[in-house]
Image: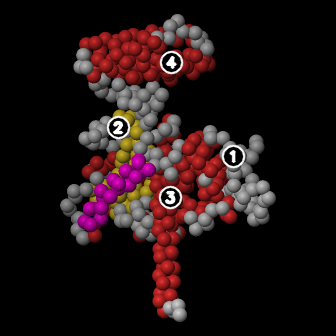
Amino acid sequence: MRPKKPETTRSGDLFRARLDQIINLRHELAQLAGQIDWDFIDGEIAPLYSDKGRPGIPTRFAIGLLLLKHIYGLSDEAVCERWVYDPYFQFFTGEEFFQHEFPHERSDLSHWRKRLGDKLELLLAESLRVAHASGALRSKDLKRVTIDTTVQPKNISFPTDAKLLHAAIKGLNRLATRQGVQLRQSYLRIAKRAAMMAGRYAHAKQFNRHRRELRILRTRLGRLIRDIGRKIAGHEDIEAAFALPLANASQIRGQQQRQRGWKLYSFHAPETECIGKGKASAPYEFGVKVSIVTTNARAPGGQFVLHAKALPGNPYDGHTLKAVIEDTQKLTGCEIERGYVDKGYRGHDTENPRRIFISGQKRGVFGVIKRELRRRSAIEPVIGHLKAEGHLGRSYLKGRAGDAANAILSAVGHNFRRILAWLRDLFCLFLIEVLRLLISRSALNPAC
């Protein structure tokens, strides 16, 4: 059920302190809270509510908490903990009085991410609107863009055969315990020692012994799969619960290190893909490909992210360019005049290929276009900030939907960080001008 709109009393309370009397209202976070159109966001999210049930969490509280998490690069637990003792966080989420306890559950953030789904792009559009309204982003900055892809790593360790086999054995045992399936033998102790010794033998380059430990792990995993299959035969509900884990375990048991074709790189996150970006430090990264679109020129408030989207399936960069440009134009409401990409986009399928310029291109590159093409590599620091200060460096959210949400929210957090820095600089400039005015007046009217 849609929550009731909170009403501000504007009156004092004998036992509680008003937040607007505690905080500095000129603080950039307090100014940002006043510039975001919370009513518009609430109206767009209203269709997601059911007509029945108890009233839900206020929209401003849930959306504000998600924004704070990605602005400051915090986890769900950390942002809920900081909300309790940070009055600026409470003011940003719409509280009127200082609260001494967190009023909701931490898991509500997870439920809200799932509920929003495709609506998360509203937050990215709102961040661009606030940046434009505050003067940090100009309309002409939206017409020349830079497009690139990067890898959003998944929260998994480096996948080796021994680790994957051991993880499959542990995962099947956990599920069997949860479903009440009595196994003939768990093989947990044997698998733990075999995985540990396989790593030691590989490090010592004793590969015959290493392969022997892998055979032990594969044999035990096969026994476990067959034992579970016999025990759950005829129980449709339990068979449905074991269908995907058993298929993943069979895939892990049968795949080889250097085989061609599809491979499984994580038992608990089967959507993980192996992507090679040609980096010397990390030849292969395990996660999902993400497309990032930024302004080409540096706007007054810095470089803003205009679009972010997860690209599952590891598609060729050039085949994604047309859809990315269309989505960016739909999001910003401004037609892209020129786009700048790297050589990974050669052979792209855009409708107007003459407005796309590839790094190293010579034909048709002169004057302003040549200067703008030199700025193509300026997107790399933006991606670095998304990974270092945001959550793009490692996705902790579950499934492909979690990967898509993490990419968009990381871009939203980056844009609002730029806006906060812009508001902070504006306030400093205002103070400097006031001081100059006071100094000039004191010089004209010296004290007797």
Disc 3 to disc 4, C-alpha distance: 43 Å
Q: Amino acid at mark 3?
A: Phe
In front: label 2 or label 3: 3
Image marks 2 and 3: residues in contact by CB distance under 8 Å: no
Between 158 and 144, the one lying in front of the other is 158
Q: Residue at x 34, y 16 (%)?
A: 197
Q: Which residue is mark 4?
A: 172
Which quadrant of the structure image shows residue 286? top left
User: Secondary structure under badge 3?
Assistant: helix
In front: label 4 or label 1: 1
Figure disc tally:
4
Q: Which residue is mark 1?
A: 101
Q: Residue at x 41, y 63 (%)?
A: 302
What stretch of residues is rendered in magenta?
370-389
Which quadrant of the structure image shows residue 393? top left
Majority secondary structure in the magenta region: helix
